[in-house]
Amino acid sequence: MAAEARGIQRWSGWLFVSPWLLGLALLFVYPFVASLIWSFSEYDLLTSPRYIGTDHYERIASEIVQGKGFGKALWNTFYYAAVSIPLSTIMAICLAVMLNWQVRGQAIFRTLFYLPSMVPMVATSILWLWLLDPRDGMVNGLLSFFYEAPPLWFQGIQEGVSTSSPFQFGSKDGLTLMSLWGVGNFMLIYLAALGDIDGSLYQAAELDGAGSFQKFRHITLPMLSPIIFFNLILGIIQSVQAFTQVYLVSEGTGQPAESSLLISLQLFLAAFRDLEMGYASAIAWVLFVFLALMTWGLFRSSRNWVHYRGVRI
Amino acid sequence: MARPLPIVILLLLAGIVAVWGATISLTNETPLDREEVVFWHFWSGSDGEVVNDVVRRFNASQSDYYVRAVSMPGNNFDMKLFLSITGGDPPDLINQDDPIVGDWAFRGAIYSMEEIASVEEVENMKDWLLPSARSLGEYDGRLYAVCNGLDIRALYFNRELVEEALGRSVPDELESIEQLDMIAELCTQYTDGELTQIGYLPDPRRLWAWGPVFGGDFYDEQNGQVTASDEAIISALQWMQGYRQRLGANAVATYRQNDQSLPNKMFPLLANRYAVILDGQWRVRDIEAAQKVSRTRGEPVTRYGVWPLPAESRQGKTGWVNGNVFLVPRHANNAQGAWEFIKFWTGLEGHEKDAAETCVAGGWIPVSKHVAESLEFQTYLSEHPLFARFVDFAATEQVPTPLVPGASRYYREVNNLVQRVMYDDEVVDLTAELNMLEQTMQKHIDRIRSHPSFAEEQADE
Amino acid sequence: MNNVAGKWKWMALLCVSGMFLLPLLLMLLASVKPAEQLTGDPYSLLPDRVLFQNYRDALESIPYVKYLANSIVLCVGSVAGTLISCSLVAYGFSRLKWRGRNLMFAIMIGTMLLPWHVTMIPRFVLFSELGLYNHLAAIILPTFLGDAFYIFLLRQFFLSIPEEISEAARLDGLSELGIYWRIILPLSKPALITVAMFQFVASWNDFSGPLLYLSDHEKFPLAYGLEQFVSSYADQTHLLMAASVMFTLPMIILFVVAQKSFTRGITMTGSK
């Protein structure tokens, strides 16, 4: 009987996952192979692709060296990720800790903190374009108390988190601010993880005379580390894929002076504006390899700092 | 667990809206006995009304074709069109203003007019168009796009401010770039050390205009060479950089923040933020509207004027032209109907009066001198002297962005470089940068051209 | 002592909520301000006069109901596709044992790391050739082929259902499809609702799909229609804000109505 059931399971398993298998073939395997072939071809969608060798990869290499085009987009994406991921991680943890306080109206606060994350990206972009207007925006209205020349946000090429123009915030910093406002999803995940921490750990620490900070440092953080790890990986993927907001705040051009040109937009422009499908495919592949290496590296390093409670994902 | 009742109500509501929405049709009905011509454009608001009126007049004059106009507002309009062509569902006719004609012609995304009309008709059309209008559509000896409205840029100035600064009456034309610089300098004002008014500030996107005015060419048609590092273009960029150095990148970016030339943005000249500004003929209406407001309020009426760009050297061209062009996507269902509509709009074959009416309604510059010379249009011009100057400029030597495959990237890369020069205080080695850009673009364009074009491929078969 | 600390905490929470809500509040206020006030006195908080006219003007400038209907079709279609395909696949990955299952599962997790750009262009070409260009189906159909993230989520949930229940059902002669439909699905309502809502929000917000695949006004959903609106009315902040509020409101309502399962769903993704 059991053996028969297993026999049925053997083929019915494949049957059950067949929608995904079809999806894998159509939406992943075919595009994967096609884009790999096109990355070595001249292809404009209208005429058939022609093999041209490694031209596109050479262009990518030279653009990285010169810091233009893809090189510029790579730097922008790196800057955006390097600033927004740590900030959003810290912020999400802090907010989660705050929401974990046992105070009156806790449920309401949870709702309020999360609400901005429900605002669709298109509306978020419109809203922040207006709030961060250099001349008429509310944010600069406030900042004018601290600045002689308030930041230019989406109209500026400055990088506010750098030594060359500290606190002179430009287009990428505006994007970062937008991402911080919508940090709610991660916040909730941290909140759940906080709820899972065994209260007796804190009691034991208190008996040892640990203060709030020490408890946070030695119990909360290590217990959250698997989530932080998850957050990092997802954050990297999200930065690389960020498209809607970048497209909207720069009118689809990455302006000014390519300062908000993130990789996804560069790829999009190359493909559908310059009609360089081959080059765009090459970018996609470089990106894929790059992401794979990055994820692999993170997984390797995670052994040293991520504490699983005897469980592995 | 979610409460079921609100969800049920929501679903019901959603269902009602979905059914309601399905019954709404945004497109109007095409008569059964006519062939439909689907026409995409990006005009909306009052311009959209003008377009609808042209379409209505055309449809009334016709018994074979029926144009259905679809307004597709949005940036990246050209991309959308390209996707529809590759997606296999293109409209029959489109109107747009990006420098993609050469690129799309080379790749076979659009028909040349020779493919859809008789040789004679195309020759008539070529003769009909002003040289500047023709230059926007000719590629490889064929007419791929028909211009229906020229965009001419010139220097608008606030007569009161300039007169006051000069201490004498304002000249009709500028003698030289130096004179423009001098006026710009005089009209730039600081209050408490803060910049409050700018005399003149070159727009980063307009190296395309200033390059030719300084006597340079971006592209050598004869030899197929990119010539971005032309001496004259370097000096034009140097000249633009001079403004950034004097005003500081921050001021430039703050003043430039809202795209000056987007039709929707308020014209900064009217806010007294500038004394002189480079912009297109559509601003005449903004100026006239503002003057009318002052007049009805009994306030003093600010006078404005316009100068052509001051050609720097003898070889200098008078300016940079772009404009709206009609394109017929390849595999359009009804290319013939599209061609009829193009002729109607541009005034060919006895439609001068209609064309003049269109131009008057939209404040557009006619693409043919026959239309410009028509009585209706001349009457209009006599009432709008500022606009009349633009019509004159349109007949002078105005150069377009080069029509060459890969032009969209060329256009973008140049603008990116100029933005870098204008928005960043760092000193850029202009010659080196332009040289590098030239090499990169040459390689880019050569690579595209190293494959047979669509037309050549067709000829082989 | 404790009480004082509690008050401080409360104050801190209040301040932070204020910071989060302020932009939304400003959007709401701007949506009823007269246009002159927004350009003339950009830093003022309260509207000089409350103008609901802005909403009417915005509604007249875009075919809101048409776009809304398209959004709903898109959302409902995608949610249906996701629920059907993902639950089936998740069942296969959790409740059945078959050779190659672990390998397939690993591959599926791997596809989650793939940036959408890699597949964007070939997918566009493929869909155009299938004649799906300019059809809502181009956006809805892929959801019937499963999504790694949701499959993962549902699988985790299905795994928590005791195996004995299935064994008993098998002894009763129920087929695998019967077990899936009559036993597992009813037990997994919370997880299914979560996935449904995730997909609903994702479809509601989807911008790049319509950007690539739709060219006909008749078919635009709100997310894309709004962008079109932006490019035509860039200077009309009051109308933009009114349109944005109308675009956001359904999401907020959805969130308030289904808040519990929503937060629960998000936390489920994290803690496992």
Image (tube, rainbow, N blue to C red):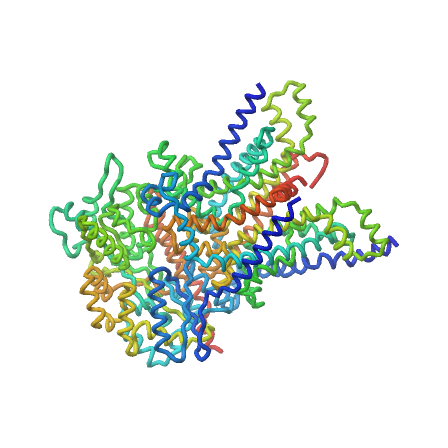
State whether residue B140 appears in this view.
no
| C101, B431: nearer the viewer | C101
Task: Please provide percent x and percent y for residue A215.
Answer: 62, 25
Horizontal side of B360 relative to B55 (left or right) equals left
* Viewer-proximal residue among A138 and A13: A138
In percent of width and height, residue B249 lies at 32, 42
Q: Residue furthest right?
A: A1
The image quadrant where one finds the N terminus of chain C is top right
Q: Residue at x 55, y 22 (%)?
A: C5
Residue C201: % across, % down: 57, 50
Q: Residue at x 20, y 56 (%)?
A: B307
Q: Would you identify the image quadrant in which residue C83 lies?
A: bottom right
Residue B461: x %, y % from top left: 49, 78
Q: Is residue B192 above or below residue C200?
A: above
Vertically, is A98 above or below B293? above
State left or right for residue A159 relative to residue A287: left
Quarter the C terminus of chain C occupies: top right
Q: A9 or B212: nearer the eye?
A: A9
Work out whether residue C42 can be spotted. yes
